[in-house]
DNA sequence: CTGAAAGCGCTAACAT
DNA sequence: ATGTTAGCGCTTTCAG
């Protein structure tokens, strides 16, 4: 009755279809690829045969001859904890997937979580099963970045590490955005504004700090910036505690992510300070953290979905022969009640 | 000097290596696949030649002949918003990736976010580029689930939809866990305990409700369960508000996820109720939400990483010829201060 | 419009 | 131990 479980019978091939339809393999192939110059009769016979024998084209064989796979890889090279916590990655994936899907490309997300992964990945990428790549959260000196470049695969980065050379990327202007929101924070009348600066080994982290410095200009006081390793809630708490110890009179905080800001707010509030009364705080990302804060967090909106989409479209364009080019997306300040 | 950009020269093949090394293709292939019976001389010559011509094997060609790809797909079929919010997915990915990586398999995460995606995906899966699949968050009647079964691909599900038949899965016992934590909540002396029940169209959601009913036994009062669509913070708020209106005297809440619990706590607290004084609340997941709550949330620990790993190992075992079998993982109650 | 034939890059007998 | 030969399943000239 039902297909026997486990009896994975030989898959039908073009040949089977050709025989069933009484035509040649070439004609079947023409139908498969929607080419002209196939008679209606032949087409009908072939369609019927395909259905009858349950034919599904073998992609490996097709890739081998046409030298492309109609698939693009999206590489996430993120340290363990960050991948789990990063509020943007999922949106980037979804954005990229939808752009690729519209162009009938399959997106395959590949994770680089260990040295072994990186190794296998570079082999995988050069194996011909992937036509192009989107790289999320590459860092300076990243072996993946180097491998992608060496391979000469069409690629687009989300974010913009400095050693990218002329590669395509989709990014926001972190520095400018940080400058804007800090300026706005200062504009609320704060005198002693500090920053909790995470991830300075990444372009995003370094640029946000630079923007902060820009905004303060001559009033910049280095003792008011506290460095922390990660864009995380707990590092935000630790950073805030350290800062408070050094500068109890601080009255404004730019946290380099919403999670960091949430941690900072928690510490501020349990130290008895009111927000935004005693101290104003602003964040970065406009992630779900921002609305969950009390009061809701003023922050800069990061267009994660659009970044993913833009990177995917760039790869698609390169696949069609275009040159790689950078794309910079707007990220407006979203003002709420925390400052 | 440097490799000319854009001059994607023809990739070296086994043939080029063979010529360069002065041996036959067969011998090159043997070296590539680490087989015995290759002289040291030949091996050395071939290794040198590979390096010299910059040879990287073409996976499509290899897949075509050996009929496997050394890659497994991990399919995420999650509605848009949930994918972004779900605290478990990233951990599942990481767990599966690490198990597959150890076995030298490439994991490719595939997203099904639209009808078009589902279509393309089923073709992709049957294309021979994927040896097996892990399916995350399948739902009853899911077309992906059906396609996977029809294809006869080795597969393992994370979670356990009822229409799975004899397929392999890795899951927790949601019903039992829900019963346990509810019992514990009741044990703190609560008289009127309710539930905010999300995602009843999914096995996890329905099972958690069933466990809740089990725990209450004869004391179960249907008017004390509020249904909400999603495992989300905002639905948690809405659910809590609705419940409070119907039953202002409620003194215990089982929320079907940590995010839901966090939303409920927010509403409870801004209504002037203290936690755990006036009402005890417990959640489910042990995600980052739980520690972020104030007071920290009592919840059930969901072993997401291990679920991913177990599903991957199941696929690997099936690839080696084993029969599919279910795996149920422990999920201990983690008691904190919210109840 | 269609068939025949060649070949994508690799592996796997089968000889030797 | 190694060379030779036949394909894996598909597309793509090239004739006709």
Image: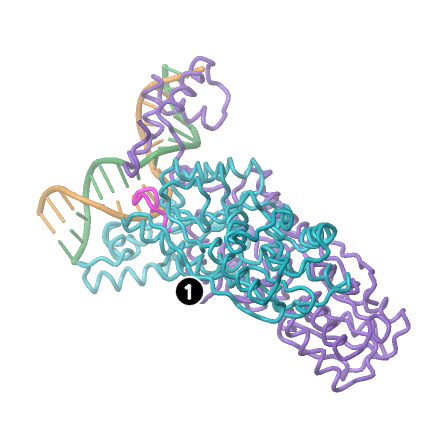
Chain colours: A cyan, B purple, C green, D orange
Q: Residue furthest top?
A: B41
In this image, B27 relative to A268: left or right? Answer: left
Query: From what the image shows, is residue A320 above or below residue A291?
Result: above
**Residue to which mark 1 is pinned:** B116
In this image, A23 relative to A137: left or right? Answer: left
**Chief secondary structure of the magenta portion:** helix
Tell me which corner region of the image, top left, top right, bottom left or bottom right, holds residue B7.
top left
- Seen from the viewer's position, the closer of residues A24 and A336 is A336
Q: How many marks?
A: 1
Residue at 66% x, 67% y is: A293
In this image, A318 relative to B107: left or right? Answer: left
Tell me which corner region of the image, top left, top right, bottom left or bottom right, holds residue A39.
bottom left
Q: Residue furthest front?
A: A218
Q: In the image, which residues are magenta?
A: A61-70
For label 1, the SS is: helix
- Seen from the viewer's position, the closer of residues A291 and B329 is A291
| Residue B181 lies within the magenta run | no
Residue B216 image point, x, y percent: 83, 75
Quadrant into which the C terminus of chain A falls: bottom right
- Seen from the viewer's position, the closer of residues B100 and A264 is A264
Query: From what the image shows, is residue A46 above or below residue B231?
Result: above
């Amino acid at each position: 009755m039902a297909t026997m479980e486990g009896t994975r019978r030989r898959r039908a091939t073009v040949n089977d279809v050709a025989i069933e339809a009484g035509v040649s393999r070439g004609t079947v192939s023409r139908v498969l690829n929607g080419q002209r110059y196939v008679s209606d009769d032949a087409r009908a016979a072939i369609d019927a045969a395909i259905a009858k024998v349950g034919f599904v084209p073998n992609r490996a064989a097709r890739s081998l001859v046409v030298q492309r796979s109609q698939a693009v890889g999206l590489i996430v090279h993120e340290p363990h904890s960050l991948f789990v916590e990063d509020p943007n990655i999922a949106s980037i994936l979804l954005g990229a997937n939808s752009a690729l899907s519209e162009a009938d490309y399959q997106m395959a997300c590949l994770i680089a979580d260990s040295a072994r992964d990186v190794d296998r990945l570079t082999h995988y990428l050069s194996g011909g099963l992937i036509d192009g790549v989107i790289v999320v959260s590459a860092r300076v000196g990243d072996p993946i970045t180097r491998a992608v470049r060496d391979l000469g695969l069409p690629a687009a980065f989300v974010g913009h590490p400095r050693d990218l050379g002329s590669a395509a990327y989709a990014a926001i202007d972190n520095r400018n955005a940080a400058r804007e929101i800090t300026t706005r924070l200062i504009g609320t009348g704060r005198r002693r504004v500090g920053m909790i600066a995470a991830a300075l080994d990444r372009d995003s982290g370094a640029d946000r700090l630079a923007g902060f410095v820009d905004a303060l200009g001559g009033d910049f006081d280095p003792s008011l910036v506290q460095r922390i390793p990660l864009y995380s809630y707990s590092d935000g708490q630790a950073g805030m505690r350290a800062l408070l110890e050094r500068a109890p009179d601080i009255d404004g905080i730019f946290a380099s992510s919403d999670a960091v800001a949430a941690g900072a707010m928690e510490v501020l509030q349990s130290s008895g300070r009111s927000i935004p009364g005693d101290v104003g705080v602003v964040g970065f990302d406009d992630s779900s953290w921002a609305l969950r804060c009390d009061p809701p967090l003023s922050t800069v909106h990061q267009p994660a979905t659009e970044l993913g989409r833009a990177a995917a479209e760039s790869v698609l364009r390169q696949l069609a022969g275009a040159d790689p080019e950078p794309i910079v997306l707007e990220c407006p300040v979203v003002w709420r009640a925390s400052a």
